[in-house]
Amino acid sequence: MTLTESATALPLHSATPIEWGRAVLAEPVRLLIDHAFLEKKAASNAMELLTRWPNEWLEGWVEAMTGVARDEANHLAQVTRILLARGGRLDRHHKNPYANDLRQLVRKGEPVELLDRLLVAALIEARSAERFGVLAAASSDAELAAFYRSLFQSEVGHYKLFLNLCRKFTAADVLESRWQQMLTAEARILAGQEPGPRIHSGVPR
């Protein structure tokens, strides 16, 4: 299966056009800075989930969260190396309106809060995988194309991992209904994002 075929197999309710990839790659250093912060947040999110939930440990919970944190920290190291080699450096502050809007979907109180936190994580991983696939196809820079291609399968694996954890404590029909609601909301939230050199930015208008 090719990268394009793998991307179309993702459950996302909208597809990113190649024009988005070409536009954000026009400012590769700024894109790398945004990417680095996303990997940092993903690693810290996994560690927060590790210690916060659940009250009754699910089988494989610790291994899953520490594995995701390790992967994301490794991705952070990779993107930072590329960033520094290209004369960039991390900013002190970073905003991610896409992720912030997704987190507004999380309901309060267990077990629905844990379910929604995991589904938001799955959404971000699935969309990131799709975007990395687009970047790999759009980039004329061999190093960046190879880098984004290498991240695709990892992000797909993480999105599936988060969904599998949801299945351990949520009935199948309840999970599917909420997952479809979240996928619909994610597509709407992404469509409302401003364009710019960010992994989760809007499509140029």
Image: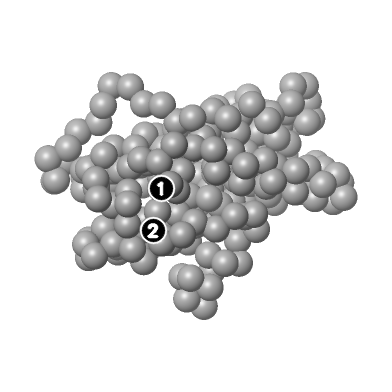
Task: State the mark number for residue 19.
Answer: 2
Question: From where the camera sits, is residue 67 visible?
Answer: no
Which residue was labeled with disc 1? 204
Q: In which quarter of the image is residue 157?
A: bottom right
Query: Left of 107 or right of it: where is 135?
Result: left
Query: Left of 66 or right of it: where is 70?
Result: left
Question: From where the camera sits, is residue 137 visible?
Answer: yes
At x 32% / y 52%, what residue is drawn?
23
Q: Position of residue 96 (x, y in %)?
A: 45, 31
The front one of 94 and 23 is 23
Pointers 1 and 2 in contact (CB under 8 A)? yes
At x 82% / y 43%, what residue is drawn?
170
Q: In which quarter of the image is residue 188?
A: top right
CA separation in Å, label 1 and label 2: 8 Å
The front one of 54 and 155 is 155
Q: Sort mark 1 into few (<14), some (14-19) or many (20+) by Cα contacts within 10 Å.
A: some
Q: Where is residue 104 in the image (x, y as percent from the top left)?
A: 64, 26
At x 78% / y 31%, what residue is drawn?
112
In the picture shown, does residue 48 fall above or below 30? above
